[in-house]
Amino acid sequence: MANLSGSVSTRSVSHKGQAGRIIGRILIYIVLIFGALVAIFPFFWMISTSLMSLGETINRQLVPRVPQFQNFVQAWSTAKFGEYFINSVLVTVGTLAGLLVTSILAGYAFGRIEFKGRDLIFGLFLATMMMPESVTWIPNFLMIRGAIVPLPGGTWLNTYWALTVPFIANAFSIFLLKQFFSQVPKDLWDAARIDGCDHTRFLVQIVLPISKAPIMTVLLFGFTASWNAFTWPLLVTTNDTWRPMMVGLWTFVQEAGPQTHLLMAGAVISLLPILVIYFITQKQFTEGIATTGLKG
Amino acid sequence: MARTTSPLGESTKPQRGIKWLKQREQRTGFLYILPAFIIIFLFGLFPIVYSFYMSMFNWRVRRGSFVGLGHYFDIFGDLTGFLMFLAGIGLFVLAYNVWNKAFRSVKAGGFPARLLASVILIAGGFVLTSGWGRMIAAGNSNFLNSLIITLYYALGTVPLEIILGMVLAYILFQNIKGKEIFRMIYFLPYITPTVSTAVVFQIIFSSRETSIANMVVGFFGMDPLKWRFEPNPVSELLGLNLQGFLAGPSLALVTIILFGIWTYVGYNAVIFLAGLGNIPQEVYEAAEIDGANRFHMFRYITMPLLSPVTFYLSLVAFIGTFKAFNHIYVLRVPSAQDSVITASIRIFDSFYKANMYGVATSQAIVLFLVILGLTLVQNKIMGERVFYG
């Protein structure tokens, strides 16, 4: 008897627990879905507005009646977003190429070669990571204008070099690669050295092939930073020649106020490369960022 | 190694070889870091020194007369006030130390020590605020106020984005269907360019009656607001009559704060999620056997074991808000007046609009020192309270 009642009571408890758990689950999903809606709504709205006619944007409609795909054509050519887009692509590619070379070499040196002053220089590099942009704006601006050191060509304002050169090396990428390179087993290096390998060959033939993941992370970070760059390009581009996407978008906001549909089409164009790369490399992207976050 | 076994005559030769090898290593090392060094030195390290140099001149596009520390005196205005302000901070540190000691010796004189700490704290607050008042009255109140605005921005953004990120991560960590999709969506605002999303936020938070933000508040029965065009403090709009620092941020700044939170919550969630994955499952199982409930587990296992991540994220976020520029610049409008001008925006205006390079660099150096100080303080406080597994 006692045994039976006991089993009944536990069953009723577990029933109650299950109901509670289901309610809990539903609440959890409501929170998650609400969060996702908040995160994604601005993008939805941006895309929706980019397909509206001018009249529909003024009436603040939520969805266009007939999608106006020609908005994108107009934004690309008339509003010059095509020109800005190509500038951004060229700047990003150049920056990434330089960044890759400098940070692989320096990361390798800091991680695997013993030389005098290594830790001091590395510490100085890391210190630049906490510097506010606002401290470097003015001297760098003067530098690019050729007012501090004479530059080839006099001034670099409105040139390709102003947008790329200051960014072809950064402490963060070096730090990231150094962490990885220093974990490569020493035995591997000893064996390679016996076979007559020097550092350059060891780096190119052995270290690089096994470092695809961290190099990819450096590239992804570099890509977003370069593509999203805004303040510096705003300072050093005063005309259209090399104006990148973000500054183009910003000047469009200032100059062409009421043309919201074209503005949103431009915004969508400016997002596309980031979104495409994010969706392709999604796992690598988030995990790369998560692990660097944890290590810091 | 070969030296011990090799005959005497040869013993010097490998020695020279090792020295030569070391020199070669040295050369290779320098050569490898050289490209990065040139760039980081020219555009990352040299500017700090040069900024300080520039800050000692009247520099309007071209270098003018030497003024020494004059720009700094202009910022802080009253030397006594500035010293009082520093003394106030010193008293805060002292109060913190006394309080900490009291916690370590719970029995012996805990209460008097805590009382003492509170007295020191109040005294510190008094000295600090009166010093600050003198500085505002005599110094560059525009720039000093921008530091207050920066503090509002930091205090408004950081705690919320950290808590929301932690909650989302904790929920996502339970076996959720479509976890990957949620994570992907939450992360989206972080990677997308500020300018692109800002143009949407500009319209969502416009002052028009039909704007989406106004439709949302209208749903709750409130009148339409001016959002990013509103320079008045939120507390005033709520009918409270607070003065000075307590009046809090303007609605325009709150709009920018919302934009900042929207951007960074997902990033925090992703990193918290990775941190949660690093907590060994056995700890939870052991606690469950001991009869701990969900809340206990969160409070006594998850939170302490996650504290290094929380520390890292809040440090980065706090310093990030003090450095922040883009998020504020793209949403600010003239009618929001000074209420959205943070320190970096003020520096940009002195530089770009007013062309006062000397003044701008002195302000930048002050901001840099503030960030340095904050980093040190936060490292000390959090470093003592963080539990490293």
Image: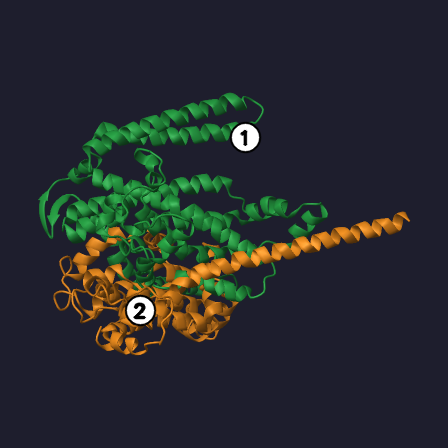
Chain colours: A orange, B green
Label 1: which secondary element: helix
State how far apart marks 2 and 1 are (Cα): 66 Å
Read off the residue under disc 2.
Answer: A56
Read off the residue under disc 1.
Answer: B104
Decide: few, some or many residues near mark 1? Use Cα within 10 Å; few <14, some 14-19, many ≥20.
few
Towards the viewer: A145 or B286: B286
Indicate the position of residue B300 as horizontal and vertical percent values.
60, 44
Say whether residue A97 is visible: no
Q: Answer with the quarter of the image where residue A253 lies.
A: bottom left
Could you tell me the amino acid type at mark 2? Glu
Q: Is residue A7 left or right of residue A107?
A: right
Q: Is residue B91 left or right of residue A193?
A: left
Towards the viewer: B125 or A82: A82
Indicate the position of residue B172 as horizontal and vertical percent values.
55, 58
Could you tell me the amino acid type at mark 1? Arg
Question: To which chain does the residue with label 1 belong?
Answer: B
Q: Answer with the quarter of the image where residue A289 lies.
A: bottom left
In percent of the image, x 36 and y 50: which residue is there?
B257
In percent of the image, x 69 and y 49: which residue is there?
B288
Label 2: which secondary element: helix
Q: How many marks?
A: 2
Q: Is residue A186 left or right of residue B57?
A: right
Question: To which chain does the residue with label 2 belong?
Answer: A
Q: Quadrant of the C terminus of chain A?
A: bottom left
State if disc 1 and disc 2 touch (CB < 8 Å). no
Towards the viewer: B39 or B341: B341
Q: Disc 2 vs disc 1: which is toward the camera?
A: 2
In percent of the image, x 61 and y 57: which residue is there?
A25
Say whether residue B196 is visible: yes
